Image (cartoon, helix red, strand yellow):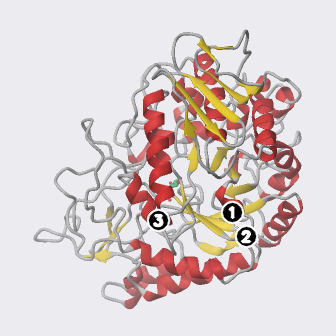
Amino acid sequence: MPRTAPWWRSAVIYQVYIRSFADANGDGVGDIAGLRSRLPYLRSLGVDAIWINPWYRSPMADHGYDVADYRAIDPLFGTLAEAEQLIEEAHRHGIRVIPDIVPNHTSDQHPWFRAALAAGPGSPERDRYVFRPGRGPSGAEPPNDWVSCFGGPAWTRLPDGQWYLHLFAPQQPDLNWQHADVRQEFESILRFWFARGVDGFRIDVAHGLVKHPELPDLPPRREPAVLGPLAPREPVDEQPRQHVDHPHWDRDEVHDIYRAWRKVADEFPGDRSFVAEAWADTPERLAAYVRGDGLHTAFNFDFLMSGWDAKDLRAVIDDSLAMLGAVGAPATWVLSNHDVMRHPSRYGRERVKRWTANEPYRPDGAADLELGTRRARAAALLMLALPGGAYIYQGEELGLPEVEDLPEDMLQDPVWERSGHTDRGRDGCRVPIPWSGKAAPYGFSPAAASAAPWLPQPADWGGLSVEAQTGDGTSMLELYRSALRLRREHPALGDGSLTWLETPEAVLAFGRDPGFVCVVNFSAGMYRLPAHTSVLLASGPVENGLLAPDHAAWLAV
Ligand code: NOJ
Protein backbone atom coordinates (compact mmCIF):
# COMPACT_ATOMS: atom_id res chain seq x y z
CA MET A 1 0.00 0.00 0.00
CA PRO A 2 1.46 3.42 -0.86
CA ARG A 3 2.45 5.39 2.18
CA THR A 4 0.46 8.61 2.50
CA ALA A 5 2.41 11.89 2.70
CA PRO A 6 3.49 12.80 6.22
CA TRP A 7 1.14 15.15 8.06
CA TRP A 8 3.61 18.01 8.28
CA ARG A 9 3.66 18.53 4.50
CA SER A 10 0.19 20.04 4.60
CA ALA A 11 -0.60 20.71 8.27
CA VAL A 12 -2.37 23.79 9.56
CA ILE A 13 -0.58 24.54 12.81
CA TYR A 14 -2.13 26.84 15.38
CA GLN A 15 0.30 28.88 17.47
CA VAL A 16 -0.59 28.97 21.15
CA TYR A 17 1.07 31.88 22.93
CA ILE A 18 0.33 30.19 26.19
CA ARG A 19 0.51 33.30 28.42
CA SER A 20 -2.37 34.82 26.48
CA PHE A 21 -4.51 31.87 25.42
CA ALA A 22 -6.63 30.78 28.38
CA ASP A 23 -6.13 31.28 32.12
CA ALA A 24 -7.71 28.53 34.22
CA ASN A 25 -6.37 29.42 37.67
CA GLY A 26 -7.29 33.10 37.56
CA ASP A 27 -3.83 34.60 38.03
CA GLY A 28 -4.16 36.63 34.83
CA VAL A 29 -1.71 34.47 32.87
CA GLY A 30 -2.68 31.67 30.50
CA ASP A 31 -1.78 28.13 31.52
CA ILE A 32 -1.82 24.48 30.50
CA ALA A 33 -5.12 23.85 32.28
CA GLY A 34 -6.66 26.68 30.26
CA LEU A 35 -5.27 25.27 27.05
CA ARG A 36 -6.62 21.81 27.90
CA SER A 37 -10.06 23.26 28.47
CA ARG A 38 -10.01 24.83 25.02
CA LEU A 39 -8.94 21.78 23.03
CA PRO A 40 -12.54 21.22 21.84
CA TYR A 41 -12.47 24.74 20.40
CA LEU A 42 -9.28 23.96 18.50
CA ARG A 43 -10.76 20.75 17.22
CA SER A 44 -13.88 22.53 16.01
CA LEU A 45 -11.71 25.17 14.37
CA GLY A 46 -10.14 22.35 12.42
CA VAL A 47 -6.39 22.68 12.99
CA ASP A 48 -4.01 19.74 12.72
CA ALA A 49 -1.48 20.69 15.37
CA ILE A 50 -0.55 23.29 17.96
CA TRP A 51 2.81 24.94 18.43
CA ILE A 52 3.15 26.07 22.03
CA ASN A 53 5.51 28.94 22.84
CA PRO A 54 8.04 28.08 25.58
CA TRP A 55 6.44 26.60 28.68
CA TYR A 56 9.63 25.62 30.49
CA ARG A 57 10.82 26.85 33.87
CA SER A 58 11.94 30.42 33.29
CA PRO A 59 12.46 33.72 35.09
CA MET A 60 10.42 35.18 32.17
CA ALA A 61 12.85 37.93 31.20
CA ASP A 62 11.68 37.29 27.61
CA HIS A 63 8.42 35.52 28.45
CA GLY A 64 9.86 32.02 28.45
CA TYR A 65 12.54 32.41 25.77
CA ASP A 66 14.98 32.45 28.69
CA VAL A 67 14.87 28.83 29.86
CA ALA A 68 16.25 27.79 33.25
CA ASP A 69 15.21 24.13 33.05
CA TYR A 70 14.28 22.52 29.73
CA ARG A 71 12.80 19.46 31.44
CA ALA A 72 10.41 21.29 33.76
CA ILE A 73 7.24 23.29 33.20
CA ASP A 74 7.16 26.74 34.73
CA PRO A 75 4.77 26.80 37.72
CA LEU A 76 3.05 29.79 36.13
CA PHE A 77 1.83 27.42 33.39
CA GLY A 78 1.40 24.19 35.37
CA THR A 79 3.29 20.96 35.92
CA LEU A 80 5.02 18.30 33.89
CA ALA A 81 2.13 15.95 34.66
CA GLU A 82 -0.29 18.48 33.15
CA ALA A 83 1.88 18.83 30.07
CA GLU A 84 1.76 15.06 29.66
CA GLN A 85 -2.02 15.11 30.04
CA LEU A 86 -2.27 17.88 27.50
CA ILE A 87 -0.25 15.91 24.95
CA GLU A 88 -2.44 12.87 25.46
CA GLU A 89 -5.71 14.79 25.32
CA ALA A 90 -4.66 16.76 22.25
CA HIS A 91 -3.85 13.49 20.52
CA ARG A 92 -7.29 12.19 21.43
CA HIS A 93 -8.74 15.23 19.67
CA GLY A 94 -6.58 14.49 16.64
CA ILE A 95 -4.30 17.46 17.34
CA ARG A 96 -0.52 17.09 17.34
CA VAL A 97 1.67 18.99 19.76
CA ILE A 98 4.85 20.91 18.95
CA PRO A 99 6.64 22.68 21.79
CA ASP A 100 9.18 25.42 21.22
CA ILE A 101 12.84 24.60 21.86
CA VAL A 102 15.28 27.41 22.61
CA PRO A 103 18.82 26.26 21.78
CA ASN A 104 20.62 29.52 21.00
CA HIS A 105 20.66 30.73 24.59
CA THR A 106 19.61 29.73 28.09
CA SER A 107 18.41 31.87 30.95
CA ASP A 108 21.08 33.47 33.10
CA GLN A 109 19.46 31.41 35.88
CA HIS A 110 20.18 28.11 34.13
CA PRO A 111 22.46 25.93 36.34
CA TRP A 112 25.13 25.96 33.63
CA PHE A 113 25.32 29.74 33.52
CA ARG A 114 25.30 30.04 37.30
CA ALA A 115 28.10 27.51 37.46
CA ALA A 116 30.00 29.44 34.79
CA LEU A 117 29.71 32.66 36.78
CA ALA A 118 30.81 30.94 39.99
CA ALA A 119 33.73 29.12 38.38
CA GLY A 120 35.36 32.27 37.00
CA PRO A 121 37.42 33.19 33.94
CA GLY A 122 39.19 30.38 32.10
CA SER A 123 37.12 27.63 33.73
CA PRO A 124 35.64 24.74 31.70
CA GLU A 125 32.21 25.86 32.95
CA ARG A 126 32.59 29.13 31.02
CA ASP A 127 33.37 27.20 27.84
CA ARG A 128 29.73 26.25 27.44
CA TYR A 129 28.92 29.91 26.79
CA VAL A 130 30.75 32.64 24.92
CA PHE A 131 32.97 34.48 27.42
CA ARG A 132 35.78 36.75 26.22
CA PRO A 133 38.07 39.46 27.55
CA GLY A 134 37.19 42.98 26.44
CA ARG A 135 39.07 45.20 24.02
CA GLY A 136 41.00 48.36 24.80
CA PRO A 137 43.82 48.86 27.31
CA SER A 138 41.72 47.93 30.32
CA GLY A 139 39.34 45.57 28.51
CA ALA A 140 36.53 48.03 29.02
CA GLU A 141 35.27 47.75 25.46
CA PRO A 142 33.17 44.81 24.28
CA PRO A 143 35.06 42.03 22.46
CA ASN A 144 33.46 43.02 19.13
CA ASP A 145 30.78 45.27 17.70
CA TRP A 146 27.90 42.81 17.67
CA VAL A 147 24.53 44.23 18.65
CA SER A 148 21.66 42.69 20.57
CA CYS A 149 18.44 42.10 18.64
CA PHE A 150 16.68 43.88 21.50
CA GLY A 151 18.91 46.97 21.28
CA GLY A 152 22.31 47.87 22.74
CA PRO A 153 25.52 45.84 22.62
CA ALA A 154 25.38 42.04 22.47
CA TRP A 155 27.90 41.83 25.32
CA THR A 156 27.65 42.35 29.07
CA ARG A 157 30.66 42.75 31.36
CA LEU A 158 30.95 40.90 34.65
CA PRO A 159 32.61 42.22 37.80
CA ASP A 160 35.54 39.86 37.13
CA GLY A 161 36.23 41.76 33.91
CA GLN A 162 35.09 39.16 31.37
CA TRP A 163 32.30 39.78 28.88
CA TYR A 164 29.62 37.30 27.79
CA LEU A 165 27.67 37.23 24.56
CA HIS A 166 23.88 37.61 24.34
CA LEU A 167 22.32 38.19 20.94
CA PHE A 168 19.08 38.94 22.82
CA ALA A 169 18.66 40.23 26.41
CA PRO A 170 21.52 40.06 28.95
CA GLN A 171 19.39 37.45 30.77
CA GLN A 172 19.75 35.21 27.67
CA PRO A 173 23.44 34.22 27.40
CA ASP A 174 24.33 32.52 24.10
CA LEU A 175 25.50 28.93 24.29
CA ASN A 176 28.72 27.75 22.66
CA TRP A 177 27.61 25.18 20.09
CA GLN A 178 31.21 24.12 19.47
CA HIS A 179 31.03 22.45 22.89
CA ALA A 180 30.18 18.74 23.00
CA ASP A 181 28.22 19.16 26.26
CA VAL A 182 25.85 21.59 24.55
CA ARG A 183 25.21 19.26 21.64
CA GLN A 184 24.66 16.25 23.87
CA GLU A 185 22.43 18.11 26.28
CA PHE A 186 20.05 19.31 23.57
CA GLU A 187 19.81 15.90 21.97
CA SER A 188 18.93 14.55 25.39
CA ILE A 189 16.28 17.28 25.87
CA LEU A 190 14.74 16.39 22.51
CA ARG A 191 14.59 12.73 23.54
CA PHE A 192 13.02 13.69 26.89
CA TRP A 193 10.08 15.36 25.12
CA PHE A 194 9.81 12.97 22.19
CA ALA A 195 9.48 10.18 24.75
CA ARG A 196 6.53 12.13 26.21
CA GLY A 197 4.80 12.06 22.86
CA VAL A 198 5.45 15.46 21.33
CA ASP A 199 5.19 15.44 17.56
CA GLY A 200 7.98 17.87 16.83
CA PHE A 201 9.60 21.14 17.81
CA ARG A 202 9.66 24.71 16.67
CA ILE A 203 13.32 25.72 16.81
CA ASP A 204 13.92 29.23 18.13
CA VAL A 205 16.58 31.32 16.35
CA ALA A 206 17.57 28.25 14.36
CA HIS A 207 19.91 30.32 12.19
CA GLY A 208 21.91 31.76 15.09
CA LEU A 209 23.53 28.86 16.92
CA VAL A 210 26.93 28.78 15.23
CA LYS A 211 29.21 31.78 15.55
CA HIS A 212 32.36 32.49 13.55
CA PRO A 213 35.15 30.97 15.68
CA GLU A 214 37.11 34.24 15.72
CA LEU A 215 34.07 36.40 16.54
CA PRO A 216 35.03 39.10 14.02
CA ASP A 217 33.29 42.47 13.82
CA LEU A 218 30.21 42.71 11.67
CA PRO A 219 30.72 43.08 7.93
CA PRO A 220 30.90 46.71 6.75
CA ARG A 221 27.34 46.91 5.52
CA ARG A 222 26.07 45.62 8.75
CA GLU A 223 22.86 43.97 7.88
CA PRO A 224 22.09 41.75 4.95
CA ALA A 225 18.63 41.92 3.44
CA VAL A 226 16.75 40.01 6.12
CA LEU A 227 17.52 39.14 9.70
CA GLY A 228 14.21 39.11 11.43
CA PRO A 229 11.82 41.68 12.78
CA LEU A 230 13.90 42.02 15.91
CA ALA A 231 17.13 42.78 14.15
CA PRO A 232 18.90 46.08 14.70
CA ARG A 233 17.53 48.61 12.32
CA GLU A 234 19.82 50.56 10.12
CA PRO A 235 18.46 52.11 6.97
CA VAL A 236 18.85 49.90 3.94
CA ASP A 237 18.19 50.73 0.34
CA GLU A 238 15.98 48.66 -1.83
CA GLN A 239 18.77 46.25 -2.55
CA PRO A 240 18.71 42.98 -4.41
CA ARG A 241 18.49 40.12 -2.00
CA GLN A 242 21.79 38.41 -1.62
CA HIS A 243 23.47 36.33 1.02
CA VAL A 244 26.08 38.15 3.06
CA ASP A 245 28.59 36.10 5.00
CA HIS A 246 27.74 37.01 8.58
CA PRO A 247 29.65 36.13 11.76
CA HIS A 248 26.60 34.88 13.67
CA TRP A 249 23.59 34.45 11.38
CA ASP A 250 22.96 31.54 9.07
CA ARG A 251 26.43 30.04 9.03
CA ASP A 252 26.82 26.86 7.01
CA GLU A 253 28.06 24.87 10.00
CA VAL A 254 24.64 25.15 11.67
CA HIS A 255 23.29 22.39 9.43
CA ASP A 256 25.46 19.74 11.11
CA ILE A 257 23.52 20.32 14.30
CA TYR A 258 20.21 19.75 12.56
CA ARG A 259 21.36 16.64 10.75
CA ALA A 260 22.05 15.20 14.20
CA TRP A 261 18.63 16.38 15.45
CA ARG A 262 16.92 14.76 12.49
CA LYS A 263 18.51 11.45 13.50
CA VAL A 264 17.14 11.90 17.02
CA ALA A 265 13.63 12.55 15.66
CA ASP A 266 13.91 9.48 13.45
CA GLU A 267 14.65 7.30 16.49
CA PHE A 268 11.01 7.73 17.52
CA PRO A 269 7.95 6.12 15.96
CA GLY A 270 5.52 8.14 13.86
CA ASP A 271 6.29 11.27 11.88
CA ARG A 272 8.03 13.71 14.21
CA SER A 273 8.94 16.97 12.63
CA PHE A 274 10.87 20.19 13.13
CA VAL A 275 10.07 23.70 11.99
CA ALA A 276 12.96 26.15 11.96
CA GLU A 277 12.66 29.78 12.86
CA ALA A 278 15.39 30.71 10.41
CA TRP A 279 15.67 34.20 8.95
CA ALA A 280 17.65 33.68 5.79
CA ASP A 281 18.77 36.26 3.26
CA THR A 282 17.39 34.38 0.29
CA PRO A 283 14.97 31.51 -0.39
CA GLU A 284 17.97 29.39 -1.41
CA ARG A 285 19.54 29.90 2.01
CA LEU A 286 16.25 29.01 3.68
CA ALA A 287 15.95 25.84 1.61
CA ALA A 288 19.32 24.73 2.97
CA TYR A 289 17.65 24.09 6.35
CA VAL A 290 15.19 21.61 4.91
CA ARG A 291 17.15 19.69 2.33
CA GLY A 292 18.03 16.01 2.45
CA ASP A 293 18.73 14.80 5.94
CA GLY A 294 18.16 18.21 7.56
CA LEU A 295 15.03 19.64 9.13
CA HIS A 296 11.52 19.02 7.80
CA THR A 297 10.16 22.57 7.44
CA ALA A 298 11.06 26.22 8.04
CA PHE A 299 8.88 29.26 8.50
CA ASN A 300 8.55 31.26 5.33
CA PHE A 301 8.77 34.81 6.66
CA ASP A 302 8.96 36.34 3.18
CA PHE A 303 5.21 35.84 2.90
CA LEU A 304 4.63 37.59 6.23
CA MET A 305 6.91 40.47 5.31
CA SER A 306 5.24 41.19 2.00
CA GLY A 307 2.92 44.11 1.76
CA TRP A 308 -0.60 43.72 0.38
CA ASP A 309 0.68 43.66 -3.17
CA ALA A 310 -0.08 41.12 -5.87
CA LYS A 311 3.29 41.36 -7.59
CA ASP A 312 5.32 41.00 -4.40
CA LEU A 313 3.23 38.15 -3.10
CA ARG A 314 3.35 36.32 -6.38
CA ALA A 315 7.14 36.63 -6.47
CA VAL A 316 7.39 35.31 -2.90
CA ILE A 317 5.08 32.41 -3.69
CA ASP A 318 7.00 31.50 -6.83
CA ASP A 319 10.44 31.78 -5.23
CA SER A 320 9.39 29.83 -2.15
CA LEU A 321 7.78 27.01 -4.09
CA ALA A 322 10.72 26.80 -6.49
CA MET A 323 13.48 26.80 -3.88
CA LEU A 324 11.76 24.53 -1.40
CA GLY A 325 10.44 22.28 -4.14
CA ALA A 326 13.97 21.88 -5.48
CA VAL A 327 15.00 20.22 -2.20
CA GLY A 328 11.76 18.26 -1.87
CA ALA A 329 10.47 20.25 1.11
CA PRO A 330 6.95 21.65 1.52
CA ALA A 331 6.42 25.39 1.80
CA THR A 332 4.95 26.93 4.94
CA TRP A 333 2.90 30.14 4.98
CA VAL A 334 2.69 32.55 7.90
CA LEU A 335 0.79 35.84 8.23
CA SER A 336 1.36 36.63 11.89
CA ASN A 337 3.10 35.46 15.03
CA HIS A 338 3.97 36.71 18.52
CA ASP A 339 6.87 38.83 17.23
CA VAL A 340 5.22 40.96 14.58
CA MET A 341 2.37 43.43 14.30
CA ARG A 342 -0.92 41.59 13.71
CA HIS A 343 -1.73 41.60 10.01
CA PRO A 344 -5.10 43.44 9.99
CA SER A 345 -3.12 46.37 11.43
CA ARG A 346 -0.32 45.93 8.89
CA TYR A 347 -2.65 45.60 5.92
CA GLY A 348 -4.74 48.50 7.20
CA ARG A 349 -1.98 50.87 6.27
CA GLU A 350 -1.67 52.23 2.81
CA ARG A 351 1.90 51.17 2.52
CA VAL A 352 1.99 48.19 0.24
CA LYS A 353 5.73 48.02 -0.35
CA ARG A 354 7.47 44.96 0.98
CA TRP A 355 8.87 45.83 4.40
CA THR A 356 12.25 44.49 5.31
CA ALA A 357 13.46 43.40 8.67
CA ASN A 358 15.63 46.46 8.87
CA GLU A 359 12.81 48.94 8.74
CA PRO A 360 10.78 49.65 11.84
CA TYR A 361 8.05 47.07 11.98
CA ARG A 362 5.91 49.60 13.86
CA PRO A 363 4.81 51.87 11.03
CA ASP A 364 3.59 55.42 11.49
CA GLY A 365 0.01 56.60 11.24
CA ALA A 366 -3.19 54.91 12.29
CA ALA A 367 -4.44 51.72 10.72
CA ASP A 368 -7.69 51.61 8.79
CA LEU A 369 -8.96 48.44 10.43
CA GLU A 370 -11.92 48.02 8.13
CA LEU A 371 -9.55 47.89 5.18
CA GLY A 372 -7.02 45.78 7.07
CA THR A 373 -9.66 43.28 8.12
CA ARG A 374 -11.04 43.01 4.60
CA ARG A 375 -7.55 42.24 3.35
CA ALA A 376 -6.89 39.86 6.24
CA ARG A 377 -9.96 37.84 5.21
CA ALA A 378 -8.70 37.64 1.65
CA ALA A 379 -5.17 36.83 2.87
CA ALA A 380 -6.50 33.90 4.89
CA LEU A 381 -8.09 32.40 1.79
CA LEU A 382 -4.91 32.99 -0.19
CA MET A 383 -2.69 31.41 2.46
CA LEU A 384 -4.91 28.40 3.05
CA ALA A 385 -5.15 27.66 -0.68
CA LEU A 386 -1.40 27.62 -1.29
CA PRO A 387 0.52 24.34 -1.54
CA GLY A 388 2.12 23.26 1.74
CA GLY A 389 1.46 23.95 5.40
CA ALA A 390 0.18 27.06 7.15
CA TYR A 391 0.43 28.67 10.58
CA ILE A 392 -2.37 30.51 12.37
CA TYR A 393 -1.41 32.73 15.28
CA GLN A 394 -3.98 32.63 18.09
CA GLY A 395 -6.52 35.40 17.66
CA GLU A 396 -5.84 35.66 13.93
CA GLU A 397 -8.97 33.58 13.38
CA LEU A 398 -10.85 36.22 15.40
CA GLY A 399 -9.44 39.06 13.29
CA LEU A 400 -7.77 40.65 16.32
CA PRO A 401 -5.90 43.84 15.49
CA GLU A 402 -2.64 44.91 17.10
CA VAL A 403 -3.27 46.75 20.38
CA GLU A 404 -1.27 49.87 19.64
CA ASP A 405 -2.24 51.97 22.66
CA LEU A 406 -1.11 49.84 25.60
CA PRO A 407 -0.14 52.18 28.42
CA GLU A 408 3.63 52.58 28.57
CA ASP A 409 3.81 51.52 32.20
CA MET A 410 2.29 48.17 31.27
CA LEU A 411 4.70 47.28 28.49
CA GLN A 412 6.65 44.13 29.32
CA ASP A 413 8.62 43.21 26.23
CA PRO A 414 12.36 43.67 26.95
CA VAL A 415 12.56 45.54 23.64
CA TRP A 416 10.87 48.55 25.31
CA GLU A 417 13.60 48.98 27.94
CA ARG A 418 16.52 47.89 25.76
CA SER A 419 15.55 50.33 23.01
CA GLY A 420 15.60 53.20 25.49
CA HIS A 421 11.82 53.51 25.13
CA THR A 422 12.00 54.13 21.39
CA ASP A 423 10.36 50.86 20.36
CA ARG A 424 7.18 49.71 22.10
CA GLY A 425 8.06 46.12 21.27
CA ARG A 426 5.79 43.16 20.72
CA ASP A 427 3.23 43.32 23.51
CA GLY A 428 0.55 44.67 21.16
CA CYS A 429 0.19 41.30 19.43
CA ARG A 430 0.30 39.36 22.71
CA VAL A 431 -2.81 40.68 24.46
CA PRO A 432 -4.92 37.85 25.98
CA ILE A 433 -7.60 36.69 23.57
CA PRO A 434 -11.36 37.25 24.09
CA TRP A 435 -13.50 34.13 24.49
CA SER A 436 -16.85 35.43 25.69
CA GLY A 437 -18.75 38.24 27.37
CA LYS A 438 -18.81 41.96 26.84
CA ALA A 439 -16.07 43.13 29.18
CA ALA A 440 -12.52 42.16 30.16
CA PRO A 441 -11.35 39.51 30.86
CA TYR A 442 -13.76 38.24 28.17
CA GLY A 443 -13.64 34.69 29.51
CA PHE A 444 -9.83 34.59 29.26
CA SER A 445 -9.73 34.23 33.06
CA PRO A 446 -12.51 32.79 35.21
CA ALA A 447 -15.09 35.21 36.60
CA ALA A 448 -13.62 34.95 40.11
CA ALA A 449 -10.06 35.62 38.97
CA SER A 450 -7.64 36.99 41.54
CA ALA A 451 -5.79 39.11 39.00
CA ALA A 452 -6.52 41.04 35.82
CA PRO A 453 -5.09 39.72 32.54
CA TRP A 454 -1.35 40.39 32.38
CA LEU A 455 -1.92 42.89 29.57
CA PRO A 456 -5.14 44.94 29.44
CA GLN A 457 -7.66 43.96 26.78
CA PRO A 458 -9.35 46.74 24.77
CA ALA A 459 -12.82 47.78 25.90
CA ASP A 460 -14.27 47.10 22.46
CA TRP A 461 -13.22 43.46 22.06
CA GLY A 462 -16.60 41.96 23.06
CA GLY A 463 -17.69 41.74 19.43
CA LEU A 464 -14.49 39.90 18.54
CA SER A 465 -14.89 37.12 21.10
CA VAL A 466 -15.26 33.48 20.09
CA GLU A 467 -18.76 33.54 21.55
CA ALA A 468 -19.80 36.64 19.58
CA GLN A 469 -18.45 35.33 16.29
CA THR A 470 -19.64 31.74 16.54
CA GLY A 471 -22.56 31.14 14.20
CA ASP A 472 -22.20 34.55 12.51
CA GLY A 473 -21.63 33.65 8.87
CA THR A 474 -19.94 36.99 8.20
CA SER A 475 -17.39 36.65 11.01
CA MET A 476 -13.67 36.02 10.63
CA LEU A 477 -13.98 32.95 12.86
CA GLU A 478 -16.60 31.32 10.64
CA LEU A 479 -14.52 32.17 7.56
CA TYR A 480 -11.53 30.33 9.08
CA ARG A 481 -13.73 27.42 10.16
CA SER A 482 -15.19 27.06 6.67
CA ALA A 483 -11.82 27.41 5.01
CA LEU A 484 -10.24 24.80 7.27
CA ARG A 485 -13.14 22.41 6.75
CA LEU A 486 -12.93 22.77 2.96
CA ARG A 487 -9.17 22.42 3.09
CA ARG A 488 -9.52 19.10 4.87
CA GLU A 489 -12.16 17.81 2.51
CA HIS A 490 -10.96 19.09 -0.84
CA PRO A 491 -8.45 16.82 -2.56
CA ALA A 492 -6.78 19.77 -4.33
CA LEU A 493 -5.74 21.56 -1.14
CA GLY A 494 -2.71 21.06 1.11
CA ASP A 495 0.49 19.60 -0.31
CA GLY A 496 1.02 19.78 -4.08
CA SER A 497 1.51 22.40 -6.75
CA LEU A 498 -0.31 25.31 -8.37
CA THR A 499 -0.75 26.75 -11.85
CA TRP A 500 -1.13 30.49 -12.33
CA LEU A 501 -4.02 31.66 -14.45
CA GLU A 502 -3.68 34.62 -16.74
CA THR A 503 -4.85 37.79 -14.96
CA PRO A 504 -4.12 41.51 -14.83
CA GLU A 505 -1.10 42.27 -12.62
CA ALA A 506 -3.23 43.33 -9.64
CA VAL A 507 -5.13 40.04 -9.50
CA LEU A 508 -3.74 36.69 -8.45
CA ALA A 509 -5.48 33.54 -9.60
CA PHE A 510 -4.21 30.00 -9.49
CA GLY A 511 -5.59 26.59 -10.11
CA ARG A 512 -4.99 23.43 -8.14
CA ASP A 513 -5.94 19.98 -9.29
CA PRO A 514 -8.51 18.66 -9.24
CA GLY A 515 -11.02 21.36 -9.98
CA PHE A 516 -10.06 24.24 -7.68
CA VAL A 517 -9.26 27.90 -8.33
CA CYS A 518 -8.35 30.67 -5.88
CA VAL A 519 -8.72 34.30 -7.00
CA VAL A 520 -7.55 37.34 -5.02
CA ASN A 521 -8.36 40.85 -6.20
CA PHE A 522 -5.75 43.43 -5.13
CA SER A 523 -6.98 46.01 -7.64
CA ALA A 524 -9.26 48.97 -6.97
CA GLY A 525 -11.97 47.70 -9.33
CA MET A 526 -14.35 44.77 -9.59
CA TYR A 527 -12.88 41.66 -11.19
CA ARG A 528 -14.88 39.15 -13.20
CA LEU A 529 -14.27 35.65 -11.88
CA PRO A 530 -13.13 33.00 -14.35
CA ALA A 531 -15.66 30.33 -15.40
CA HIS A 532 -16.64 28.14 -12.47
CA THR A 533 -19.31 25.71 -11.39
CA SER A 534 -19.70 27.17 -7.90
CA VAL A 535 -18.21 29.56 -5.39
CA LEU A 536 -16.95 27.31 -2.59
CA LEU A 537 -16.08 30.16 -0.25
CA ALA A 538 -15.46 33.88 -0.52
CA SER A 539 -14.17 36.56 1.82
CA GLY A 540 -17.26 38.68 1.06
CA PRO A 541 -20.34 38.65 -1.12
CA VAL A 542 -19.79 37.74 -4.77
CA GLU A 543 -22.50 39.22 -6.97
CA ASN A 544 -22.98 38.63 -10.70
CA GLY A 545 -19.66 36.79 -10.82
CA LEU A 546 -17.75 39.90 -9.74
CA LEU A 547 -15.09 39.91 -7.04
CA ALA A 548 -14.77 43.21 -5.16
CA PRO A 549 -11.40 44.89 -4.37
CA ASP A 550 -9.42 43.30 -1.51
CA HIS A 551 -11.49 40.13 -1.68
CA ALA A 552 -10.72 36.50 -2.43
CA ALA A 553 -12.79 33.56 -3.60
CA TRP A 554 -12.38 29.80 -3.82
CA LEU A 555 -14.05 28.34 -6.89
CA ALA A 556 -14.99 24.87 -8.03
CA VAL A 557 -14.14 24.54 -11.71
C1 NOJ B 1 12.50 34.46 18.54
C2 NOJ B 1 11.23 34.40 19.33
O1 NOJ B 1 10.14 34.20 18.46
C3 NOJ B 1 11.16 35.68 20.11
O2 NOJ B 1 9.91 35.86 20.73
C4 NOJ B 1 12.28 35.68 21.12
O3 NOJ B 1 12.30 36.91 21.80
C5 NOJ B 1 13.63 35.48 20.45
N1 NOJ B 1 13.60 34.44 19.46
C6 NOJ B 1 14.69 35.13 21.46
O4 NOJ B 1 14.54 33.83 21.93
Q: Quadrant of the N terminus?
A: bottom right
For the residue marked with disc 2, what is the amino acid? Answer: Val
SS under mark 1: strand
Q: Position of residue 398 (x, y in %)?
A: 73, 32
Q: Give the CA separation, mark 2 to mark 1.
A: 6 Å
Q: Is residue 156 left or right of residue 291?
A: left
Q: Residues within 10 Å of mark 1 (few under 14, many from 20)?
A: many
Residue 20 image point, x, y percent: 70, 46
State which tag comes first along the sequence, 2 or 1. Answer: 1
- The residue furthest left is 137
Residue visible at 74% across and 15% down? Answer: 541
Q: Mark 1 or 3, which is nearer the eye?
A: 3
Quarter-wise, where is residue 402 in the image? Answer: top right
Residue that badge 1 annotates:
98
Alpha-carbon distance for marks 1 and 3? 18 Å
Compared with 343, 474 (above or below) is above
> Which labelled disc corresponds to residue 198?
2
Instruction: Check residue 124 in the rendering and tell me which mark sits there, or answer none.
Output: none
Assign the C terminus to one quadrant of the image.
Answer: top right
Mark 1 near mark 3, Cβ–Cβ under 8 Å?
no
Q: Earlier in the sequence, mark 2 or mark 3?
A: 2
Front residue of 499/195: it is 499
Q: Residue at x 68, y 71 (%)?
A: 272
Q: Earlier in the sequence, mark 1 or mark 3?
A: 1
Quarter of the rendering containing residue 92: bottom right
Question: Label 3, on which residue?
Answer: 289
Q: Residues within 10 Å of mark 2 (few under 14, many from 20)?
A: many
Q: Residue at x 82, y 45 (%)?
A: 489
Q: Is residue 436 visible?
A: yes
Q: Is residue 77 left or right of residue 256?
A: right
Mark 2 to mark 3 CA distance (whole Å): 21 Å
252 versus 48 height, above or below: below
